[in-house]
Image: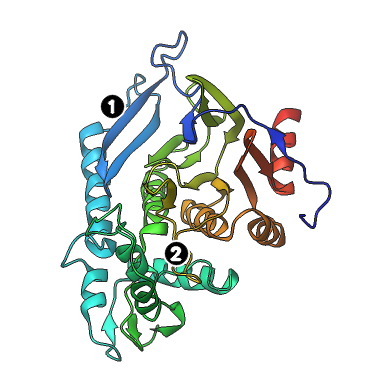
Amino acid sequence: MLANKNLSYRDISTGLGRLIVVLVCMICLLVTGCDESRILVIRGHTMGTTYSVKVIDEFPDKGNPGLNEAALKAELDEELAKINLLMSTYIQDSEISQFNSNKSGQWMEMSSETMDVVRFGMRLGELSNGAFDITVGPLVNLWGFGPDIQSGTMPSAEAVENARSRVGYQSLEVEQYPGLRLRKHKDIYVDLSAIAKGYAVDRLSEILMGKELRNFLVEIGGELRSRGVNDQGHPWRIGIENPAAGKENVLATVQLQDMAVATSGDYRNFFILDGKRFSHTINPGTGYPVSHQVASVTVLSRSAMEADGWATTLNVLGEEKGMELAERFNLSAMFVVRHDSGFQHLLTPAFEKLLENQVSK
């Protein structure tokens, strides 16, 4: 039982187990009366997935040439490439890969960008008592979900314990003065993939805000952050959706105004062995993929990196412990849980309040 008796499940139709964050009622490219603005849509590939940036370019027809779409795309692509070169474990000479190959006990100078993400990851590890751990990489790689894909295999218990011995964010030490430096006290492997996408969404958003753009939506691999309103003057709206029997079933529609949203789930990256599902989400405490019935967790926050990290953390913890932590920190979160009768979802009080406030407006 959950501690808060006011929380209750809401039935969801049975069907496919894949939860998708989709955009609902978002943009109409041909809108009558919208001659004072235009919508720029910039798309591309990054971090093994796709990205999309939608910007409302205001008053381009009143003597203002408006945004240079090609130049803006080049700037955004350059920022994404920079983040990859800093934080990707798939790039052998990235900054984080160089740190991972660095010997234990040696200080290494790091960029401010990587250090921002590392510090947040370490802080989240402290707040979650290790449920989130940026050094979980050896276990992720062992289970075949890292750069060297070997999915479909079951590692031995001895191999799991050996990998676990190399996990522990507490073995990282940060030095801020005289420079930004990082070192490890044992042979650990830092993997920032659980929060790097969210960080990238935040960085693109900051670039757009630096250009004094007031209305946009940034998305990378399903992680989103918005500012202002869409082309019709309404808050950007997303639907958290579960396909059921071939029909779109929206669990909740949320107005995303000056907020970010991220989802962590087991519906995209997993393998099945002997009829059992093995998720890419690894519990650092056990060394094994999570085995609870939570299919996904969606979190709303002011920062995409925070939403990204908290969604992963709550997914690791599962339904009961995750809800307890989410309530403690007043997080807006929704858990989608598997049951014999299908899928059900559970909302934190903060998420329910957010929905109530939006309905009342």
Q: Quadrant of residue 249?
A: top right
At mark 2, the secondary structure is loop
Q: Is residue 189 left or right of residue 124?
A: left
Q: Which residue is mark 2?
A: 288
Above or below for 350 versus 153: above
Q: Is residue 289 left or right of residue 327?
A: left
Q: Nearer the viewer, mark 2 or mark 1?
A: 2
Q: Is residue 223 left or right of residue 97?
A: right
Q: Residue furthest top?
A: 32
Q: Amino acid at mark 2?
A: Tyr
- Residue at the image position 48 percent from the left and 64 percent from the top: 283
Looking at the image, tell me whether mark 2 or mark 1 is earlier in sequence order.
1
Residue 322 visible at all: yes
Q: Amino acid at mark 1?
A: Pro
Q: Residue furthest left?
A: 93
Disc on res. 65? 1
Task: Determine the CA span between mark 2 and mark 1.
Answer: 55 Å
